[in-house]
Image (cartoon, rainbow, N blue to C red):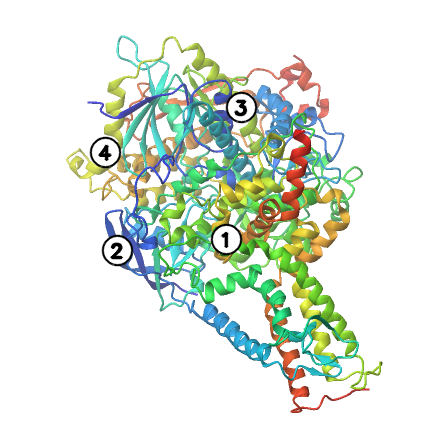
């Protein structure tokens, strides 16, 4: 169509068929990529799966999550009566004695929701688990596709509320990290290997949270004129710098939170003795 | 470095059918895939159809798929391939084929027309426009676009689902909506056009599942997903999925009506 | 016969670059139903390659700037051969044309106070080029494209059809401008009646009937081997005008841009923007010497720095220092590079070194010259922030073109024919300044669209009648390459010729024999070679069918390239002086008596036939014409001492 005018709707085309559809170049192969395109989605899927398995076990275990002064990030804040007592720790018995299962479940919903609706993780699991698409220019196996236009995926749009919640959670985990400058008798001014683990984790958690696309939008991205809001413009630039590393931070903080939890598990279960520096 | 003979498979045919044809062709130092296609034209297949223009990565005409990946032929250097490797060149697979490596990219021109143009601000004469560099930076990035349509080609929303072409503008034209919405002097809102809402309602922003293939193929290195599509999704969320904003606009509308 | 599809329009614009689109916008806004025909896709025109900027005396960067200063610079650059009224209009109207782009959505780089930033460029006294990084041409084309779309959206709201008043016929080629015939059947003296074209995709012929045709097809660079021009630049518009009976003006002036890439071979000729020098890049030879200081011609001696120190100070303090000689007009720099290479002080691949890496921090280079950085990184594997580029002259622009009326852009001799942009001659004289091209497109594109629309409105009562005989002849001409073998029985016939081979030979001939430095004997040799190619081109044959057949397209374009090449060669042979883009080794000086002389090319066979394959006579006849004296108030803008260098005695005291 040399004049570039008719709309694609004017002539009926096969309802589906994608790259092998009626008017496209007749090529039978779903893709012609010769590189190892499957490596990235496979790696992503494996990594996410490993985390899911580990975190499910730990979240439902309801044990070995507190070893003074450390509380597992999976169990903080601990909001049920069945929580282990943590002196000045983040346990408030908002949920009464009726809560029978692991108290981790109450709170994990927030970081889980934050990550589930995160723009990076969405890409990762759409590609890795749902093959939509498996990789760029590789045909996807689905007949129909409506993206994020309908329920339930339209709910991805509430990412910003999980971001607000994630700010609170990150605040509490910061508080937990401050508490790790105590010894097992709650005396201040001490530090152990666990303190370092917690410090690294909280820095990564904050970096991941602040690098969120919603955060970047809220601090300044929504503005039309940066020149009229110099402070927000500066904040937007910072968020943007971090945002460029959102994927790396998503993985790094995922690993660090699991490691922090595992560290607490090792210490609480007695498998490892937290080396104290002072 | 001396020349060598490379193995090529080039798709030839038209809408009624076709297939990959094998060629042996000479390659010299510093050449790009488009040079090789031109050599085929000049020496073996004078009627091999190919669309090209500037040969410097500035016009976005010579889009094709090389070893299954959407790329500009003029910007794909032969040195990135092994000498033994067979290099496969096909037309873009998201659009109807015309002949050989040429496809009908009319879809993109149709979509371009569906995006309402820049609305000049009322009462500002030519020559009186004042815009700060930091306010035009974002839109300027998007205006680097050379309209090669590789992002439109690679996007699985239309590549794998012909039926979505109606509802979905594609990354290039969603980016155009973002460009206009971020333009410091665009007065669309004053005329009752809310680009944030129409991005979702008219141009199919919701179809995008941000898998970033558009960003991966962009020869201009525009961060389409992070800088245009996601910010646009957030702007749409401001309008449509933020109860506080929604409530506020309801109240304001009521009070202004009353 | 004549079963080809026909449509009626008021104005047909041939070419969708800056000038064509600006003309179309103007014609449509003035009420003419307008069709645009272009060889590429809409928005891919060669204008996108323009990097530096749009010259316009907006005085944003230096308040001393004014149209008068811009006019002066343009005349100096063109060595006073410019059609001065065009240079005047251009300098006066350019700022409005740039500001208007902003109202259509263009986003130029900004000054601190939010106005359009302007940069330095060769030959311009003040920073004058509105720009967007180094992709200004892309911004221009996209803005015009989007303005066209917005007009189509308006039409859609009113008529329900996007294309009711403004339509783009993309990937179509015009092969003939059609004219009305007198009662005797001759088209000579007729007026424009439409164009004959074919769709590249299907090979289908069609005719657009229109009283006014605007030619905006750009240049002729594809007749040269080393060129920055794209495949579209086959001189189509020049040839269309010639064939329609409109003369071409001063075709000997071809600009060789001093800095094209020289390596790798496949990208040889691709442009390295002048902004590299405007922003501080310097030229060095293999001895590491900034050789441009040795090449400042007398006419420019007072305007350029004599020491490297002064030149370097100029970037920061232009009011108290003179500019470095790297920023001399393009012809001077191109010749200097040519001389250095010839004397054995060139770079390994036959160019010279253009260095920014030692002049600016890497970050600044990447920010100010992003597409140059990428171009070298991706095409040559050279990191310009770490090493010097290798550059050499490349055929870039033709100053000559269709002879037009300054105010209306109407082609001389053919009522209803207009020309704007590179295809039009006169505006730039013997040499164009960087940045003056984009502004030329806008200023004269608008004027061409305006007057074409007015002319078409005047002709509304009596639309010109399209001559069926011409349509049949045009169709037969276009189909000829498919029957090349059948014509072998012609006397002196031979086997069918490969159009690609013919094209290569033509490019080599023009490059070697009518290139940057010209000699009488070589040009005579070139004319003989062109005659031979002309004969062989009649046997250019193609395989396959009419659907998107590049071999066929090239075979048709050869006619245009051969015509235009002959114009260049004949005019260059005739002009026995060196001036701007025309350098004669055997006549190295600028001759004041030649300043008043324009050379006009016309077909030897005015009926428009191309049968003339006689090598000696050729297809082109030259005539000399004495130009109108420059208006007194414009001359008064220059110092007497300066005018003495250009003008003959009697002109000075008139």
Query: How far, Cα to Cα, is label 2 from label 4?
Result: 30 Å
Residue B68 position, x and y percent, is 38, 60
Query: How far, Cα to Cα, is label 3 from label 4?
Result: 37 Å
Residue C372 sits above or below residue B80 on the image:
above
Q: Are marks 1 and 3 in contact (CB under 8 Å)?
A: no
Check the residue under mark 2 and report the chain it is in: B
Which residue is labeled 2 in the image? B19
Residue C84 position, x and y percent, is 59, 21
Whether discs 1 and 4 lie on one chain: the answer is no
Which residue is labeled 1 in the image? B218
Looking at the image, is mark 1 or mark 2 earlier in the sequence? 2
Q: How crowded is mark 4: few (under 14 residues within 10 Å), some or many (20 or more)?
A: many
Which residue is labeled 4 in the image? C480
Whether discs 3 and 4 lie on one chain: the answer is yes
Q: Quadrant of residue C418?
A: top left
Whether discs 2 and 4 lie on one chain: the answer is no
Query: How far, Cα to Cα, is label 1 from label 3?
Result: 34 Å
Secondary element at image label 1 = loop
Check the residue under mark 3 and report the chain it is in: C
């Amino acid at each position: 169509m040399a004049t570039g005018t008719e709309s694609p709707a004017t002539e009926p085309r096969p309802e589906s068929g994608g790259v092998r559809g009626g008017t496209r170049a007749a090529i039978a192969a779903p893709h012609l990529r010769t590189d190892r395109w499957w490596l990235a989605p496979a790696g992503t899927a494996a990594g996410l799966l490993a985390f899911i398995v580990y975190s499910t076990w730990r979240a439902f275990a309801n044990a070995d999550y507190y070893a003074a002064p450390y509380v597992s990030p999976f169990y903080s804040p601990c909001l049920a009566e069945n929580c282990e007592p943590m002196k000045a720790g983040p346990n408030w018995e908002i949920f009464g004695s009726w809560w029978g299962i692991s108290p981790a479940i109450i709170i994990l919903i927030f970081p889980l929701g934050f990550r589930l609706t995160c723009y990076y993780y969405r890409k990762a699991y759409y590609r890795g688990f749902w093959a939509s698409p498996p990789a760029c220019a590789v045909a996807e196996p689905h007949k129909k596709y409506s993206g994020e236009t309908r329920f339930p995926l339209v709910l991805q749009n509430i990412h910003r509320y999980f971001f607000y919640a994630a700010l609170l959670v990150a605040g509490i985990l910061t508080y937990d990290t401050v508490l790790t400058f105590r010894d097992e008798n709650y005396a201040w001014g001490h530090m152990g290997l666990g303190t370092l683990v917690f410090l690294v984790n909280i820095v990564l958690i904050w970096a991941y949270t602040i690098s969120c696309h919603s955060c970047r939008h809220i601090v300044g991205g929504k503005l039309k004129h940066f020149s009229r809001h110099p402070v927000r413009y500066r904040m937007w630039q910072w968020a943007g710098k971090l945002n460029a590393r959102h994927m790396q931070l998503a993985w790094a903080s995922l690993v660090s939170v699991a490691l922090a939890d595992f560290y607490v598990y090792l210490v609480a279960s007695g498998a490892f003795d937290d080396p104290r520096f002072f | 470095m001396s020349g060598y003979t490379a193995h090529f498979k080039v798709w030839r045919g038209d809408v009624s059918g076709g297939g990959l044809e094998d060629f042996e062709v000479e390659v010299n130092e510093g050449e790009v895939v488009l040079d090789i296609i031109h050599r085929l034209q000049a020496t073996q297949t004078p009627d091999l159809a190919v669309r090209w223009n500037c040969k410097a990565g500035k016009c976005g005409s010579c889009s094709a798929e090389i070893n299954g990946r959407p790329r500009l032929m003029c910007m794909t250097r032969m040195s990135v391939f092994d000498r033994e490797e067979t290099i496969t060149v096909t037309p873009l697979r998201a659009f109807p084929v015309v002949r050989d490596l040429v496809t009908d990219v009319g879809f993109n021109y149709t979509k371009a027309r569906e995006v309402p143009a820049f609305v000049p601000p009322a009462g500002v004469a030519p020559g009186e426009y004042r815009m700060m560099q930091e306010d035009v930076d974002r839109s300027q990035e998007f205006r680097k676009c050379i309209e090669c349509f590789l992002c439109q080609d690679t996007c699985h929303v239309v590549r794998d689902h012909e039926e979505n072409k109606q509802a979905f503008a594609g990354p290039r034209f969603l980016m155009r909506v973002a460009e206009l919405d971020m333009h410091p002097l665009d007065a669309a809102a004053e005329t009752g056009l809310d680009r944030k809402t129409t991005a979702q309602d008219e141009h199919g922003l919701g179809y995008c599942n941000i898998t970033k293939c558009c960003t991966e193929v962009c020869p201009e290195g525009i961060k389409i997903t992070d800088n245009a599509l996601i910010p646009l999704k957030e702007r749409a969320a401001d309008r449509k999925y933020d109860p506080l904003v929604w409530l506020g606009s309801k109240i304001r509308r009521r009070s202004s009506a009353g | 016969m004549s079963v080809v599809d026909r449509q009626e329009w008021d104005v047909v614009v041939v070419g969708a670059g800056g000038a064509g689109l600006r003309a179309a916008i103007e014609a449509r806004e003035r009420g003419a139903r307008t069709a645009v025909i272009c060889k590429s896709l809409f928005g891919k025109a060669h204008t996108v390659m323009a990097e530096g900027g749009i010259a316009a005396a907006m005085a944003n960067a230096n308040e001393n700037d004014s149209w008068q200063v811009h006019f002066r610079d343009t005349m100096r650059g063109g060595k006073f051969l410019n059609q001065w009224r065009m240079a005047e209009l251009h300098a006066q109207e350019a700022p409005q044309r740039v500001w208007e782009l902003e109202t259509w959505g263009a986003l130029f780089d900004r000054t601190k106070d939010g106005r359009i930033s302007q940069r330095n460029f060769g030959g311009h006294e003040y920073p004058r080029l509105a720009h967007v990084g180094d992709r200004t041409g892309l911004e221009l084309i996209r803005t015009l494209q989007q303005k066209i779309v917005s007009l189509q959206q308006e039409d859609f709201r009113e008529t329900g059809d996007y294309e009711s008043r403004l339509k783009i016929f993309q990937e179509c080629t015009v092969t003939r401008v059609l004219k009305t015939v007198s009662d005797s059947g001759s088209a000579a003296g007729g007026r424009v009646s439409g164009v004959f074209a074919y769709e590249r995709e299907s090979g289908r012929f069609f005719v657009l009937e229109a009283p006014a045709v605007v030619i905006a097809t750009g240049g002729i660079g594809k007749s040269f081997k080393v060129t920055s021009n794209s495949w579209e630049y086959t001189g189509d518009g020049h040839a269309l005008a010639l064939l329609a009976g409109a003369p071409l003006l001063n075709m000997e002036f071809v600009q060789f841009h001093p800095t094209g890439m020289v390596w790798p071979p496949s990208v040889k000729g691709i442009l390295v923007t002048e902004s590299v020098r405007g922003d501080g890049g310097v030229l060095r030879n293999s001895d590491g010497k900034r050789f441009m200081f040795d090449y400042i011609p007398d006419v420019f001696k007072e305007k350029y720095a004599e020491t490297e120190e002064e030149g370097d100070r100029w970037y920061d303090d232009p009011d108290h220092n003179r500019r470095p000689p790297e920023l001399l007009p393009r012809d001077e720099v191109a010749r200097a590079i040519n001389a250095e290479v010839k004397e054995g002080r060139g770079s390994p691949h036959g160019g010279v070194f253009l260095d920014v890496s030692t002049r600016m921090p890497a970050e600044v280079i990447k920010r100010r010259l992003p597409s140059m950085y990428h171009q070298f990184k991706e095409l040559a594997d050279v990191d310009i922030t770490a090493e010097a580029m290798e550059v050499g002259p490349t055929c870039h622009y033709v100053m000559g073109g269709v002879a037009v009326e300054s105010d209306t852009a109407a082609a001389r001799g053919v009522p209803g024919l207009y020309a704007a942009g590179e295809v039009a001659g006169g505006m730039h004289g013997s040499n164009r300044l960087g940045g003056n091209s984009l502004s030329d497109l806008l200023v004269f594109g608008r004027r061409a669209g305006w007057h074409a629309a007015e002319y078409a409105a005047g002709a509304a009562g009596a639309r010109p009648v399209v001559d069926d005989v011409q349509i049949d002849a045009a169709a037969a001409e276009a189909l000829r390459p498919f029957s090349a073998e059948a014509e072998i029985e012609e006397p002196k016939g031979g086997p069918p010729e490969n159009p690609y081979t013919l094209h290569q030979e033509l490019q080599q001939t023009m490059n070697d024999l009518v290139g940057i430095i010209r000699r009488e004997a070589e040009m005579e040799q070139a004319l003989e070679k062109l005659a031979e190619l002309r004969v062989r081109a009649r046997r250019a044959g193609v395989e396959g069918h009419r659907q998107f057949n590049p071999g066929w397209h090239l075979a048709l374009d050869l006619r245009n390239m051969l015509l235009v090449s002959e114009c260049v060669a004949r005019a260059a042979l005739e002009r026995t002086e060196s001036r701007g883009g025309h350098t004669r080794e055997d006549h190295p000086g600028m001759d004041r008596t030649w300043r008043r002389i324009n050379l006009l090319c016309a077909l030897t066979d005015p009926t428009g036939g191309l049968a003339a394959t006689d090598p000696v006579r050729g297809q082109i006849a030259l005539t000399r014409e004495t130009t109108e004296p420059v208006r007194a108030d414009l001359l008064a803008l220059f110092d007497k001492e300066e005018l003495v260098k250009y003008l003959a005695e009697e002109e000075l005291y008139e």
